[in-house]
Image: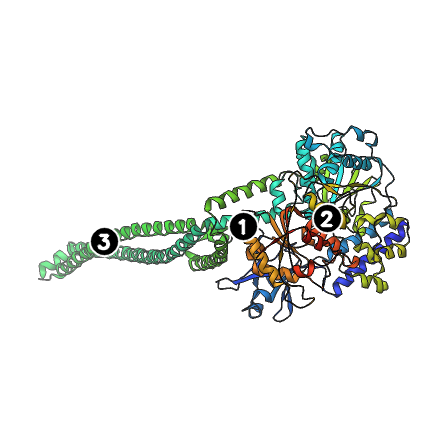
Amino acid sequence: MNTEEIREIAIDSSSAYYNYLDQNEKGIQEVEVFELEYLESRDLFIKLRLSAKLFDTEALFFKNYRNNKKYDTGQVKVVEYDGDKNILLIKPSIELMDEFQNLKHSDIKVISDLKFLIQRVKTWFELNGADIALPLKTSSLKETFDSIRFIPGKEFQPSLNQKQSLENIFINPFSYVWGAPGTGKTQFVLSYAVLHYISNNKKVAILAPTNNSIEQVLRGVIKMTDKAGSDRTKILRLGTPSKKFAEEFPDVCEEKGVQKNLQEIDKQISILERVISYDNAIEEIKIKEKNLRIFDTLLYAYQKKLKIKDEVDNKINLKKRKEIDIKFKNEEIKKILNDKNIIERKKNSILYTVSKFFSSSSKYEDQLEVVQSKIINAYKDLDFYNYEYESLDRELNAEQVSFEKANSNVLNILSNLKGLFIEYTNYEPQIADLSEKNLEEVKSVIKSLLRKEKEEREIDSHLIQEYKQIPIQQIQYELTKYINLRNKLAAASTEERLKSVQVIACTLDGYIGRYTESKLNVDHIFLDEAGYANIIKTLTIFNHRVPVTLLGDHMQLPPVCEINDSDIKGEAKYKNMFLWAQSAIHLDHIFVRDRDTCLNQYLNNIPFNPIDIKKTSLNATYRFGNNLALILGQHVYNRQFTSLNPIGETQILYIDAKKIEGLKSRISSNEVQAIGKIVENLKRLNQEDFVILTPYKKQIKLLNTQLPKERNDLKILTVHGSQGREWDTVILSVVDTSDKWFVDSTILASKGLNLVNTAVSRAKKQLIIVCDKSYWINQNGQLLTDLIRNGKEIKN
């Protein structure tokens, strides 16, 4: 196919895939609820313990199986997500409270829609699909690859096969380094290639299909770059890291990429702070409730002040009236005195003296006597008025002093109240304006805020249950660690770092999302776990005209595609879906074969046959023992596959668990019971690095119910969930007998050989197979059968 044909089928398959998922309600992350608890509160708060980490808390919706309805986060609010404990706290709206009453954990699922990732691929090809091509340019370090400086020490010297793979990387524009788990693809081949580019001041990109795989790859690379003395700041992991990776390698993570992680860290900081301060916070609430009574004291003091103010005003009015009385009395006395003067003048006149000589009249004398009496009485009244005035003045002064004291008391209480509730002013500024005029209003606001704070602490009570077994010193240590981690993560700008870093690492989806409208400025692109990456996403790295190297194991699990092969084969609209279903290692075929040939090669499970890609093989594993390597060599890899594990043989054990369920039930209760005993024994021996794997989700449910601690610690996984990881002990729950499908290593269509190989090759020290022995011991040609025949039985 030419470039335009590839672009067209990429866009078409993306549209078809999106529509299929949308119509069939797939392409979503369905997270089961292990535990459901209603919190004691005035409102309806529900605590959910989840079966898996949430991909994104913003793209959630909830399905209620009681009424078969779905609700988005506008209807059911996400109050809090504790990533450490995998607990989600939700609050349904008032209108939905009845629909969320009396639910069991099995009545609800948490769902995240991931179809946007497919739309993003389609957009990439619409914008960039015309520019893809197989690389023709070899490495700029082609002439110097034989001068790679290996780290001193026997344990760091690459094998002959690993050196051949390094040569392949540097002399061919398109290379594939194949190797089973533990063969040194990352720690030796990829790491030394990266170190050679770094030492020559070149830049490379490392991609992988999943978060787990990119972080597993980086752990291996960083281990070697640390040994070589290379600064970690030369490596930048784009995108959102896991909490554990961010804690281990904060200087490798980008600021923007960890922004979401920073938000999660902030949440964890908040959670731990609230756990630590819970008892004090409850006590503070009680104190605040007690302090609310001060409003009553203030109201009483204010009313007393008003009463005194009324008395002061009354005394002032009385004093003013008395001043008027005194004024009028003085005017009255003045008038009387004037009358007296007139009478005295008349009395002393010549006319009155002559008239009195001729008569006995005493007219003016009598008048003077009356006036004199009036004067005496008026002065008495005036003296009394002055006395009353002075008394009122003294009383007024006393009342004014009382008023000042009352006013000062009110102001002191006001100031005290503002101080007691000052933290609330951040939410309600009017509290800072508390005065006599808005007492009741502010009191109502504070009561409302206090009620809200109590409700929040009621929510926090569930945290105490989760952390009550953890010493406070450990919680404080975790808090300090989170704070330090946050400070480190927020220290650098991504755009600035991209200018100077020499290794850019991210998932394929992260790369597609970030580089839709730009290109990586690198000298070489590496794709690890390429067997698990599909063709369509891997094609997006072929528009840079730089060498490309795939690393992986095509005998492990292939990419996941929701559309099954029978639909791809039978329906014309799905003919192009092989781009999503086929491993990236077959990618070179689409540039030299037509569409139908490529489709038929996929449907007929034609083995990997490189055309333009140059392959080298790694035949010795360091992960597991030679006994397991020999069995895998017979069934999966070539017979030259061996082990160089210095620890020795991998212990292969099996336990008989008779299948009692019907065919195609995809569950085995006896296996679950047996695994429970195995886990108890491992814990007793302090062998905590273990995982329980099974091909079937139904069996996962049974295991989760039986082993809640392991469920909460995410130690129960599907085989797909284990891709790219390793444990000391792997426990494999087989489930099937004659109805076998995913564990049937003889049927190409089931990919059973890949699945069983992936599961057992996760084990470093010990593999424990739990199955119906009476069936599997007699299945000639099956990988599981040979493992059991070469293993040792654990007796119940």
Q: CA distance from mark 3 to mark 2?
A: 117 Å
Q: Residue 397 at what x, y percent from top left? A: 28, 50
Q: Amino acid at mark 3?
A: Ser
| Looking at the image, residue 268 lies above or below residue 199 | below
Q: Is residue 222 left or right of residue 527?
A: left
Q: Residue 134 at what x, y percent from top left? A: 86, 44
Q: Is residue 652 left or right of residue 171?
A: left
Crowdedness near tag 3: few (<14), some (14–19) or many (≥20) residues, C-alpha within 10 Å: few
Residue 391 image label: 3
Q: Residue 375 at what x, y percent from top left? A: 18, 56
Query: Which residue has dot 2 on it?
Result: 631
Quadrant of the rendered image containing residue 358: bottom left
- Disc 3 on helix, strand or loop? helix
- In this rendering, does residue 507 appear at all? no
- Disc 2 on helix, strand or loop? helix
- In this rendering, does residue 131 appear at all? yes
Q: Amino acid at mark 2?
A: Ile
Q: Nearer the viewer, residue 388 or 742?
A: 742
Q: Residue 476 at what x, y percent from top left? A: 49, 44
Q: Nearer the viewer, residue 403 or 619?
A: 619
Quadrant of the rendered image containing residue 169: top right
Q: Nearer the viewer, residue 324 or 352?
A: 324
Query: Which residue has dot 1 on it?
Result: 683
Quadrant the C terminus occupies? bottom right
